[in-house]
Image (tube, rainbow, N blue to C red):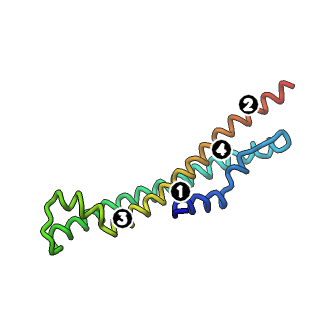
Amino acid sequence: MDDNEKLLEKLKKDHPIDQMITFSELDITEKLTKNDFLIVKYRDLYHQELAKLDKLEVLLNKLIGIRYKYYRFVDDHEWTKQEIEKFAIPSDPKIIQMKKIIRRQEVKLRFFEMAWKAFDKRQWSMKMFMETLKGY
């Protein structure tokens, strides 16, 4: 199991969406009242993680610039522009590490987006279920 899978499992454990999303005739009223809060909560978590991802991408671009200057002007090897962009930057350990951090952040972002959309969709499902119950 790689780091991203472990992160996803931890998020699922900390936020048991599958259990929270189910409802029945017995608990629908309670879950319907809590659903708006959950939509807002997970939408906010999504936007927080999106802001973090944006910052990480800015940092990656800065790091690429720093590492490019290093390979171009400091490194003993006489790199051409194309060699730096094609070989040095993609294999640079600092760049690889930063991209790994960004991928982890993307996992968090996708998880909270999925949760937000699941509660939003559940809102409509519960309303339709209530309308069906009223018909009987």
Checking the image for residue 60, the label placed there is none
Rendered residue at 83%/24% (across/down)? 135
Q: How far apart are marks 2 and 4 (CA)?
A: 14 Å
The image position of residue 61, as x and y in percent, is 31, 60
Which mark sits nearer the N-terminus, 1 or 2?
Answer: 1
Q: Image point 48% across, 55% down: which residue?
A: 106
Q: Which residue is drawn at 15% across and 71% down?
A: 77
Secondary structure under badge 2? helix
Q: Quadrant for residue 79, please give it.
A: bottom left
Q: Which residue is labeled 4 in the image?
A: 119
Towards the viewer: 19 or 33? 19
Q: What element carries label 1?
A: helix
Residue 103 image point, x, y percent? 45, 58
Give the quarter of the image for residue 132: top right
Q: Dot 4 surroundings within 10 Å: few (below 14), some, or many (20 or more)?
A: many
- The residue labelled by disc 3 is 96
Q: Mark 1 and mark 2: span between their CA atoms? A: 31 Å
Give the CA separation, mark 1 to mark 4.
17 Å
Classify mark 3: helix, strand or loop: helix
Image quarter where the N terminus lies is bottom right
Label 3 to label 4: alpha-carbon separation:
35 Å
Query: Which amino acid is tagged 4?
Result: Phe
Left/right placement of residue 31 relative to residue 75 reads right
**Relative vertical location of residue 88 with respect to residue 109 in this rendering, above or below:** below
Residues at circles 1 and 2 in contact by the CB criterion of under 8 Å: no
Residue 130 in the image, given as x and y percentages of width and height? 79, 33
Q: Position of residue 85 (x, y in %)?
A: 22, 58
Q: Which amino acid does label 1 sit on?
A: Lys
Q: For the residue carrying disc 2, how many other residues have a C-alpha within 10 Å: few (<14), some (14-19), or many (20+)?
A: few
> Is residue 11 toward the left or the right of residue 84 in the image?
right
